[in-house]
Image (cartoon, helix red, strand yellow):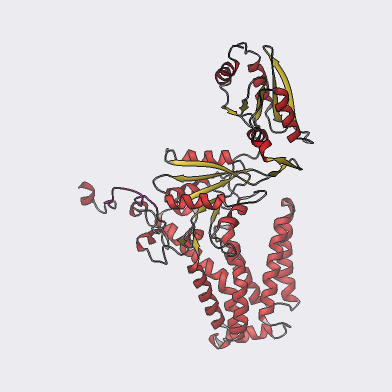
Amino acid sequence: MTRPVSINGTRQLLNENDLLNPLSSSLKKNVDNLKKMFEQCDDIVFHFTEFSNITGCLIFLSEMVSNQAMFEIEQGLSSFSDRSNMKEAMTSFIRKRFSFSSVMEVDNNQSVAEQILAGNTVLIVDEIKTAFVFHSSNSLGRTINEPNTERTVRGPQEGFVEDIHKNVMLIRRKIRTPSLKVEYLSIGNQTNTKISVIYIKGIASDEIVKEVHQRLSRIKIDGILESQYIESMIKDSPRSPVPTIFSTERPDRVCGSLLDGKVAIVVDGTPFVLTVPAVFVEFLHSSEDYYDGALVATTLRWIRFLGLFVTLILPAFYVALTTFHQDLLQSPFLIRMASNREALPYPVLIEAIFMLLTFELLREAGLRMPRTLGGAIVTILGLVLIGQAAVQAGIIGPVLTVVISITALTSFILPNYAFHQIIRFSGIPLLILAGLFGFMGIIVGLMFGLTYLVSLRSFGIPYFSPVSPARKESWKDVFIRAPWWAMETRPAGLDIDNIQRAGDGNYAKPPQNKEEEEK
């Protein structure tokens, strides 16, 4: 059986048995096998060294290894002198001498290759059938800074980065308990991307954890470059455009989900971490909801619900109103609108679609332009092209310009980027239905959409939980954000093992007056 292996762009077929064969006691044979495996890989360094009349070879990736770590390895090896029972002596010496980093042992070609490609240094010694792995990778990548897509005024200002170890550290730093389990695995025949599955034992459902592992194990693909690869291959409805897996770059958001009994999937190379299962209302919640007071957080949540409906149906409502239901407008306003639209060449439906497409073009242009120019150019083009020139040229009406501008503004109220995108584009089918059938088209479209959302599941959990099926005990964190003292239990419907969040089941609310406080 052969297995394709790609190393720095070189694709070759290696026999499966050659990869799994144990290391030989001959240094030359081991090095020859590795050189054959890494043929045409000029960044792989084979550095032969001698210490106490012992020949060894240090193998590493030149761009990924710290020079300081390599210097310490060579300096440390030079002090070895015991050749009696060399295997045990060498192992004992290395573990005592190299206290600056953890050292592990591997005994086959595949493990050696994986460790080298991970940025570690491998030492192969003559007459020893075990290779020693030194964790010497150079810490590259950007530093921990503020999340780009989920900004808050109050609360932690640190976000995930592209390094999986830093991301796991950010989670560990907030949840300091042995119950927090971190399980690593690799996915991708060519990339061998490191994945970690994180959950809290005793809170997360064992069935959901098992299901996550099963779905990840079924992934067969050459490479994983971003967490969306994983998301699209493990979601319940693969063809559904609706996000049924939550993605975030905020460590505090992931920790909150873990404490609610969910499972996190961290992918190396991306700052976006996945949490499962996900429910619909979760996409309308912000991290800042839990750092503000209950009244303020509840008010902001209702503003987001309002923004959701405005983004979804405002253009469709305007098109239906002006096309089929003019009798609902007051006469002065109707006369003004009729006069404004008298010289316009196209129906209001065509104008609305044109405006939405123009907004999307400007938005994409702003994202792709250089950061120093994008904002200014898009602002100028938006003001001149949409706000003034199009209206004066008689292509679109001024009221429609206001409607589309409000819709574009309210779409950014939605805190989750993936959810923001699908809601924005879902307004187009409603717009077409409104232009063809009026308010009836909007109602039918919303009914079908709601029915579809209710039918969805995320890792076996109803997508509209705890609204449908109704779990009223969990509504304290759905439409409102109740005070922390009132949220005694975790969200129902997730089949979690430990439902109690605070207290002993008889958790009482704070004293309401002086007499209760004295008691």
Evaluate whether residue 156 shows in this view: no
Answer with the quarter of the image where residue 356 lies. Answer: bottom right
Residue drawn at the location 63% of the way across and 32% of the way down = 108
Answer with the quarter of the image where residue 390 lies. Answer: bottom right
Magenta: main secondary structure equals loop
Was residue 118 drawn as part of the magenta stretch in this picture? no
Q: Quadrant of the N terminus?
A: top right
Q: In the figure, is residue 470 to the left or right of 214?
A: left
Residue drawn at the location 64% of the way across and 76% of the way down = 400
Q: Position of residue 244 (x, y in %)?
A: 53, 60
When the figure is inspected, residue 290 is found, relative to residue 44, above or below; the finding is: below
Was residue 507 drawn as part of the magenta stretch in this picture? yes
When the figure is inspected, residue 365 is found, relative to residue 154, above or below; the finding is: below
Evaluate whether residue 249 shows in this view: yes
Query: In front: 446, or 289?
Result: 446
Number of marks in picture: 0
Magenta highlight range: 495-508
Query: In front: 354, or 445?
Result: 445
Query: In front: 410, or 287?
Result: 287
Q: Position of residue 241 (x, y in %)?
A: 59, 64
Residue drawn at the location 63% of the way across and 76% of the way down = 399
Q: In the figure, is residue 98 to the left or right of 351?
A: left
Q: Position of residue 64 (x, y in %)?
A: 69, 33
Q: Position of residue 348 (x, y in %)?
A: 66, 80
